[in-house]
Amino acid sequence: MPEQTLGLTPSQTVGPFLSIGLTWPGRHLVVPEDAPGAITITGVVTDGAGAPLPDAVVETWQADPEGRFDHPDDPRGASGTGFTGFGRALTEPDGSYRIVTVKPGAIGDGQAPHIDVSVLARGLLDRVVTRIYFPDEETANAADPVLAAVPEERRHTLVAVAEGPGVLRFDVRLQGDGETVFFTT
């Protein structure tokens, strides 16, 4: 009997049906659009070839403006404002997403104000995790131990770009040239 060569088994991936189970209307509003200090974060999620992903999910988790998390593990406790710190946006057909939130405060451990981001999309076996840092926090960003651990030539992929008053742009490139820095969880 001739020797048989077996091909690779395809990986199981998240399909284009991803958004069916993850819709959560209104969750792109971490705060109401007219809330004091509200900012809008927009961007586009693209694949390695630069093509927009029309069916990705962008989730955010952050501290409130006082640097507190609405979570039992935060020893300082929640600020009591009703701020949940969690947002979820589905990408549009052009790969764009939009989150309305507030700028988080520093959390008191040397980390600059930032927003944690998870992205889920077809072709990924697990979520990818990154951060959004703020362009007006140069001193805090320079001292941030997580950002300092990223090679200098790639740090810009973690810093949002100001596009106008209260509007920041943060694009996510899943791989290839200009790939966003992702962290292990």
Image (cartoon, rainbow, N blue to C red):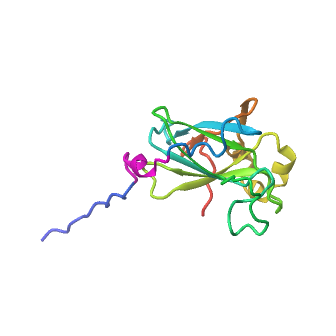
Q: Residue furthest right?
A: 139
Residue 60 location in percent, x, y?
62, 50
Q: Position of residue 4 (x, y in %)?
A: 20, 66
Quarter location, residue 145: bottom right
| Position above or below: 122 against 39 | below
Q: Nearer the viewer, residue 23 or 184?
A: 23
Residue 137 versus residue 79 in the image, above or below: above
- Give me the residue at 76% from left, 49% from top: 104
**Residue farthest to the left?**
1
Q: Position of residue 86 (x, y in %)?
A: 62, 52
Q: Residue at x 37, y 49 (%)?
A: 15
Instruction: Give residue 7's position: percent from left, percent from top.
Output: 28, 60
Residue positioned 60% across, 64% down in the render: 185
Does 21 appear above or below 96?
A: below
State yes or no: residue 101 in magenta. no
Which of the image's four quarters has the N terminus?
Answer: bottom left
Side (left or right) of 25 relative to 181: left
Q: Which residues are magenta?
A: 14-24
